[in-house]
Structure formats: structure tokens, C-alpha cells
Amino acid sequence: MGRFRYRMQNILDVKIKMETQAKNEFAAANLALEEEKERMNALIGRRKYYENKTREALQADVMDFQGVTESKVAIRSIEEQMRKQLNAIKHAERVLEEKRLAMTNLMKERKTHETLREQAFEEFLMEEKRLESKQIDELTSYTYGIKQNES
């Protein structure tokens, strides 16, 4: 039996490498999105802290106007940071979606080439069976011919 050689194996290898790279890029983009979400959660926690601090200062027996003012300024600053962080999260989500689409397309291309490789292998097997059958027929004809000459 001959050896199977897929003539586009180098293209398939490149597609596999590109898919692996796309998966790594997708994972990195996913990690970046999670980091942005963590930053947002930290800002939410800081805002809650200052809101509680303001509430406590307003409910205290002696009003701490300076503390209330500082807390409100901090809350406004944090809310501005939260708006910026929300934009950063949206950007990270867009990047993640782009990486997901690129990865999906590369996976489709790789699967297409693998299917072509499988079809080429099936054709190779059929050709091998045909050649084997031909050789068996020739051998049978030869041995039959020899027996005919001997008789």
C-alpha cells in the first residue's frame, strides 16, 4: 500500500496554527473584558462606601458638612469614572466579539480543509483498492494462463 500524502497539508497546518492563535487572542480579549468588569465592580464598591459615609454623616448628631461635601464630590468623581469604565467595557465587548467572529471563521476554514483531506484520503483508499484488485486479477490471469499451458 502506498503512502497517503495530502497535497494541501501545509495549508491545513497553517489554518490550524492560525486557529490556535485566534483562540489565544479570544482568550486574551475575554480576560481583558473580565478585568474591565472587575474595575467597574471596584468602582461600584467605592461609590457604595461613600454613599454610606454620606448617609452616616447626615444621620449623625453633629452635622459634618465638610465630610458630606467631600463624600458627594467623591461620589460624582466615581460616577464619572464609572461612565468611562462603562465605555471601556463596551469597547472590550466589541473587541471580544470581533475575536470570536475571527476565531469562528478560522475554525470553519480549518474544518473545510479537514473535510477535503478526509475526502482525498477516501479517494486514495478507493484507488488503492482498485490497484489491489487489478493486481489480484493480473495474478489470477497469470496463474490461470500457466495452468492452461501446462495441460
Image (cartoon, rainbow, N blue to C red):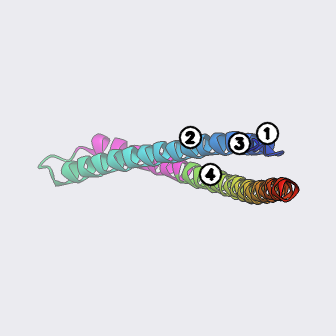
Going by the picture, which residue comes out furthest to the left? 61
| Spatial separation of the CA atoms under disc 4 and disc 3 | 24 Å
Going from N to C along the chain, the mark reached first, 2 or 3, is: 3
Q: Is residue 111 above or below residue 15?
A: below
Picture residue at 58% right of the left edge, 54% below the top: 93
Going from N to C along the chain, the mark reached first, 3 or 1, is: 1
Tag in front: 1 or 2: 1
Going from N to C along the chain, the mark reached first, 1 or 2, is: 1
Label 1 belongs to which residue?
Answer: 10
| Spatial separation of the CA atoms under disc 2 and disc 4 | 14 Å
Picture residue at 15% right of the left edge, 46% below the top: 62
**Which segment did they paint magenta?**
64-85
Magenta stretch: residue 79 in it?
yes
Residue 3, x across and y down, in percent: 75, 41
Name the image quarter holding residue 116.
bottom right
**Quarter of the image where the C terminus is located:** bottom right
- Main secondary structure found in the magenta portion: helix
Number of residues whose C-alpha sits closer than 10 Å to that of mark 1, classed few (under 14), some (14–19) or many (20 or more): few
Tag in front: 4 or 3: 3
Number of residues whose C-alpha sits closer than 10 Å to that of mark 4, classed few (under 14), some (14–19) or many (20 or more): some
Going from N to C along the chain, the mark reached first, 4 or 1, is: 1
Label 2 belongs to which residue?
Answer: 28
99 left or right of 39 in image:
right
Number of residues whose C-alpha sits closer than 10 Å to that of mark 2, classed few (under 14), some (14–19) or many (20 or more): some
Considering depth in this image, is 68 or 142 the residue closer to the camera?
Answer: 142
| Spatial separation of the CA atoms under disc 3 and disc 1 | 12 Å
| Spatial separation of the CA atoms under disc 2 and disc 3 | 15 Å
Amino acid type assigned to the residue bearing label 4 in the image: His
15 left or right of 30 in image:
right
